[in-house]
Image (cartoon, helix red, strand yellow):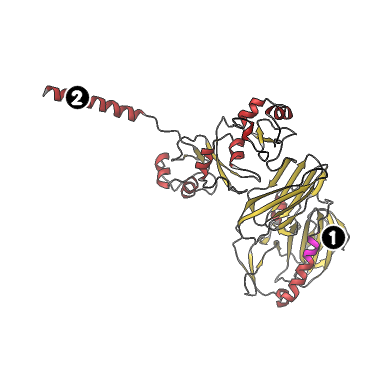
Amino acid sequence: MHKIFRVLLIVLYFSGLFYQTAEAQPSPELPIYIVQSGDTLSIIAQRFGTTVDDLIKVNNLTNPNILNIGTELKIPGLEGITGVLTTMSLEIGDTIRSTVLRNNLSTDQIIRLNRIIIPTRLFAGTTFIIPKTSETSMLHPALFPENDDTYLDTAIALLSNPWKIKMDNRSNGFWDFLPSEVLFTSTKSEKSSSLISPYFTYFELGPMPIYQGKTLVIRIKSSFPLELTGEIAGQKITFLKQSAQNYIALQGIHATLNPGIFPFKLAGTSPGKSPFSFEQMVVIQSAGYGAMEYISGVDPKTIDPANTVPEDNKVLAITTVINPEKYWDGQFKNPSYFPDVITSYFGRPRSYNNGAFTYFHSGIDFGYGNKLPIYSPANGKVVFAESTIVRGNAVIIDHGWGIFSGLWHQSEIKVKVGDTVVPGQIIGLVGNTGRSNGSHLHWEVWAGGVQVDPMDWLKKIYP
């Protein structure tokens, strides 16, 4: 009996030790997410593959209906990952390897956080979740090694240490790399490469992610002169020489393009060099142009295809000409006398006279002010100034580099073809001509033959 009692005491003693030890174990460190504008617990839970209940529990939230911007939330289910979780858009040329090296992460972290199923299929513009810590150090693309390059050759080219290059790229040896794989270093220099070609010392396409109706800017700096061609979502990209071995293109994304995944293509040739080509799928997202507009009372002849098609083709022929000379400088100015009186924004689906929604609003409407002045938004040359059926009294200004302004429905035109205009110059008067049911100014901006949101040109400076 005494033996049984002693055994029970021993069992209870060690059980207590186990319980105390287990209870004393610190809870695993979890990554933090900082609440942003528009976030809800449901959105955050879906983003990180957890549940609302687990978020409430691990963060001891007393009122889950109140979620303040800037609140730090622990994210359950991501044990082993630390730091602050942020988001980034994958750039053109990004791969799992480049994302891992550029952000000093592990492949496992990237795959877990972003729930990647096929690591070899990454689309530019995809939003990636990245953990940032105080130890995070960014690496930069340095160069594409040649077939017969050694670590020493690479180190000399980059003025670096061969062992450091090996460590930065987490390689077992130089045999780990293919000529198509870029090497990374912690030091960015003028000799640095892009992610997509050894011919480029710099490549940028933005803003990322890409949205309908936006103006894309593509900048390239090359090691030698190039002839460049490109395409995105079936739209041809025209590159212009900005300065010696510096190239630029401004290209609009159509507002009615269905959101999805589209090819981006780039190719180049240079005397004495092998031609190169690059292709990657990119994500184009919806800009949310969902507010449908019913416009009634317009003249039926302004929606008759017999009139609209030839007029559209005439305007398209003008606005697809890429002038290599740039006229505008800095931010565009608002062309309206009443800049805050906006009656319709860009991109909205439209029905005329109760017809089908086969139209979209290709610009911004500034309301009222019959006979009030219309101003030039930027430097340019007048390339069209005449009366039309659909656009009424219309003026088109060429700002250079494939950028145009169209100003429709004027009561009176104050300029003629060939005139040079400056910001703030009166080019016409507000009216109610063409496809219009009241006095207003319709202003649209074209980039690379595509109408884009003019508000962007009022808010930011394009090169």
Circle on res. 9 = 2
Q: Which badge, 2 or 1, is on the more N-terminal residue?
A: 2
The 10 Å Cα crowd at callout 1, few under 14, some 14 to 19, many 20 or more, is: many
Mark 1 highlights which residue? 382
Tell me residue 452's x, y (percent).
70, 57
Is 167 contained in the magenta span?
no
Q: Residue at horizontal 81%, vertical 42%?
A: 245
Q: What's drawn in magenta, residue-wise?
A: 315-321
The 10 Å Cα crowd at callout 2, few under 14, some 14 to 19, many 20 or more, is: few
Q: Which-is-in-front pick, marks 2 and 1?
A: 2
Q: Residue at horizontal 82%, vertical 67%?
A: 412
Does 21 sit above or below residue 293?
A: above
Tell me residue 313's x, y (percent).
77, 68
Find residue 237 and report its image quarter: bottom right
Tell me residue 256's x, y (percent).
65, 62
* Three-letter amino acid code of the residue under disc 2: Leu
* Three-letter amino acid code of the residue under disc 1: Val
Does 332 sit above or below residue 192?
A: below
> Residue 337: in sight, yes or no?
no
Q: Is residue 37 left or right of residue 188?
A: left
Find residue 235 and report its image quarter: bottom right
Q: Residue at horizontal 76%, vertical 57%?
A: 335
Secondary structure, mark 1, is strand
Q: Is residue 197 left or right of residue 129?
A: right
Tell me residue 193's x, y (percent).
71, 37
Taking the view exactly as shown, the residue that stands out farthest to the left is 1
* Separation of marks 2 and 1 at Cα, in angstroms: 99 Å
